[in-house]
Image (spheres, coloured by chain):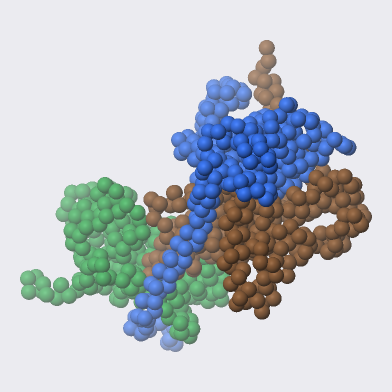
Chain colours: A blue, B green, C brown
Amino acid sequence: MNEPDKNKIDKEDFHLNFPINKGYIKRRKIYNNIAFILAVVAFIIGGFPVFHIVYSAFIVGYKYLNWHFISTLPTGFPIGAQGGILNAIVGDLYLIVIASCLALPLGIGSGFYLSLFGKKGINSIIRLLNELMVGIPSVVWGVMGFYVLSTNAGLGFHFGFSALAGGLTLGFIMTPIITLLTEQAVNRIPASYIEGALSMGATKWQATKSVVVKAAMGGIFTGILLGVLNIIGQTAPLLFTNYYNTGMPTGITGPGGAVGDLAMLIFIYIHEPSRILHYKAEAASFVLLFFVFALDIGMRLITRLTVKIFEFF
Amino acid sequence: MADNNGTIKNDIKIEVKNLNFYYGNYNLLKNINLFFKKNSVCTIIGPSGCGKSTFLRTLNRMNDYTEDTKLTGEVLIDGKNIYNRSVDVVELRRNIGMVFQTPNPFPKSIFDNVAFGLKIHGIKNKEFIAERVEKCLKYAALFDEVKDTLYKPAFSLSGGQQQRLCIARAIATNPSVLLMDEPTAYLDPMSTGIILDLITSFKKYYTVVVVSHNIQQAARVADYSGFFLSGELIEFDNAGDFFTRPKDKRTENYITSRF
Amino acid sequence: MFNLKYKDDFYKLILSVFIFGIILIFLTVVAVMLYYSYPAIIRYGLPFLWTKEWNPPKEIFGAATFIAGTFMVTFLALIFAVPLSLGIGIFLEEYCPAFLRGFFTIIIEILAGIPSVVFGVWGVLTIVPWLRDSIEPFFEKHFSYIPFLKVEENIGYGILAASFVVTFMILPIIASITKDSLASVPKIIKDGAFATGATKLDVIRDVSLPHAYKGIYGGIVLGFGRAVGETIAVVLLIGNQAVIPKSLFGVGYTISAVLANTFTFAVISHIYASSEVELALILLLVSLIINLLGRNVLKRVIGGKFSRSQFGGG
């Protein structure tokens, strides 16, 4: 080879001829620190409302936070000026129970189906439907609940504004959450557990009873708590299906079937011009936050103690 | 030998003194003492889990970002302890290139991968960068294969090409030390051969430390070699003696059972 | 009595009923919206989307005002939430010391569980007075010549108040998806950058974000979906006047707010109700499209995993 190889480089030059930008190296550290500070500030701004919401609810409402507030029905004028929020707490229980009656069998059953009998096609379709349903705005569920369950005219079940209509609407919201988490929980069971049971001649039903339910229990409970957490904060769907009741329900359908609800109570009280109702709304917010945080923490504890169904919990 | 001591001292690039490394309470590296000479290739061999990769990472402070670790002892590069508080890690790592077990190009174009080091060290002159990138790729014997696809994503390259790209990236910032953590572990024999040749050609300008569990490959490139076993440095010697007449029984067992 | 095969078939049959229930719920919600909005769709056609007047007594219905209000609130909320969430995600994944990461993540995730109505009350009693007494007077004094920042009525309620609160409602979802996407960047690639001498900022900017941007984009899309449908907090804060706001400080109305406020009155008139259901149909379609987009992207980046924040708190 006589002509110089184009791929040869002058290595001496390569190693000697390299500029070092000392000033930039120093400045870069400053940029890095600025980025760090900005990230911390973003976190503080993001975390601030958590504390401020709890703080402001407490500081305004603390004088009402006693047993009397929890255990009596609202009275006085405007209604709620005296008395407490018992109607809302009882109503929430009604709604949770009714919603669970729909959502638990549907959600857990579907979750089992998907992980025990599912095939790729049906699983991805059902999973997609569930994920889409999680994203549907709650006010749309309310409109749906109104036409299917509440309205007394036209098609539908004609339950009226009642606990049953409200609870089932909340059940629609809860179902996809429980399905998704049950499926996730059963999928996290090591395949050998279920296969072990099946190879000994057990049917899938027996395997479900003896292995699946036990192993997926933590995940399923997480799903239930997350579902309940989601529905106790809902207001919009109840506007069109249950609305509100200042007293105790006399049934679960038709006239007298409506129940109180914490979120609705807060929503109604904050619309009133009366200061005292605003304070009570804050006190009730504090109670609602207490339940929400308790469910959230309970959910995390269960996850910690049993199956890790969320990677990112 | 005695009167040569002074010159030997000057020849030393990296000196490790009483190095202990803890992960939690576990003593991962136990009292390591050794030195690497300028412009030589040193290989570190040993079974997996013996701490050889961890040792390599202590040489450029890569363990800084690992939580729950503690280090005692000294690592001197050009006579300066890199664990001194005053040491600028950024400048330290500019001076020490590192190549990893799996090729790890950035999610960028081939050109930007090599230019990355230049840009983050504040070099803005576009012509210089273009020229330097070309030289690095030539140095790493990759330029011919990628000269028409410089602006394509680096992930489009084959494994061997990606690894050479990572070498080009490592030398772009003009380091004087190259650390290689099993650079051929996941490569086919062809690419392995190219990279071993590259390592030999680096000797003239770099101090190269290669961690390997392939004894044949280690013997092929090494000037010096060391054997790690469960966190201890068993033996460190020049390659000729190390691979043919090991002093320690354990080294001999390891080498012979694998040869 | 039964052989094994038969028993399992029976079990499968029962479980398929539940699957069918889920499909039924989904189909019902779509069918109800289509069925009840049909009269309005036929009568007003596409111009429904850009007619500004909403006049029930005259039976003139157009959604433009509400669509404008909805998208203004949503976009403002995104403008606030995206940089904040990126900062939070980056902080949690890259800068936060490991022993605090879990606790700090919970703080952000717990934001996702706070009920909408509680956010609304907080907005009414905290954000609105703050805007009214501090922010609006300040802008009135110094920036009133900028039309978009003109303070028309110094009341605190309006687009800005609503979007402030919505910001905090969508922030956890974008932040935790950002965090999860950043966590999915292979460590070895980051190591490669650190070994070149990169600072954390360099690694985030040049390696992590380019690697994770698709997931972050998915998170933003899901946040958008959440913001569009947000109802109760917005009802309490936006001012509820059917005008297209000309300024950040103006009042307005969103699709969800008009539904919440007037749907129960609307059902007395056939076409009024039908128009309102058409509004709900718009929300439904937007949410379906948005979630379809967002979840597809997310599936590719962080797999089929969920984060707590993807499930709201009402």
Residue B257 in the image: state x and y as whole percent.
28, 48
Residue farthest front in this picture? A77
Q: Quadrant of residue B119?
A: bottom left
Q: Is residue C179 above or below residue A125?
A: below
Residue that lies at the very extreme toward the left in this rendered image:
B2
Which is more toward the observer, C302 or B7?
C302
The residue closer to the viewer here, A245 or C13, is A245
Image coordinates for residue B11, horizontal then vertical, percent = 19, 74
Left or right for B10, reference C276: left
User: Which quadrant of the rendered structure holds the N terminus of chain C?
Assistant: top right
Residue C194, how many percent across, how many down?
39, 65
Horizontal placement of A190 versus A146: left or right?
Answer: left
- Locate the C terminus of chain C by quadrant: top right
The residue located at (11%, 72%) in the rendering is B5
Residue B148 to residue A268: above or below: below
Q: Is residue C132 visible?
A: yes
At 42% from the left edge and 60% from the top edge, which residue is drawn? Answer: C95
| Res C193 visible | no
Question: In this image, C231 relative to C85: left or right?
Answer: right
Which residue is pictured at 36% across the width and 59% down the height? B65
Indicate left or right for B201 with B85 as reference.
right
Which residue shows up at 84% across the image and 48% down it?
A: C266
Residue A219 drawn at (x, y percent): 54, 36
Q: Nearer the viewer, residue B169 or A235?
A: A235
Identity of the residue furthest to the top in this view: C1
The foreground one among B50 and C199 is C199
Q: Residue furthest bottom?
A: A3
B78 over C258 or under it: above or below: below
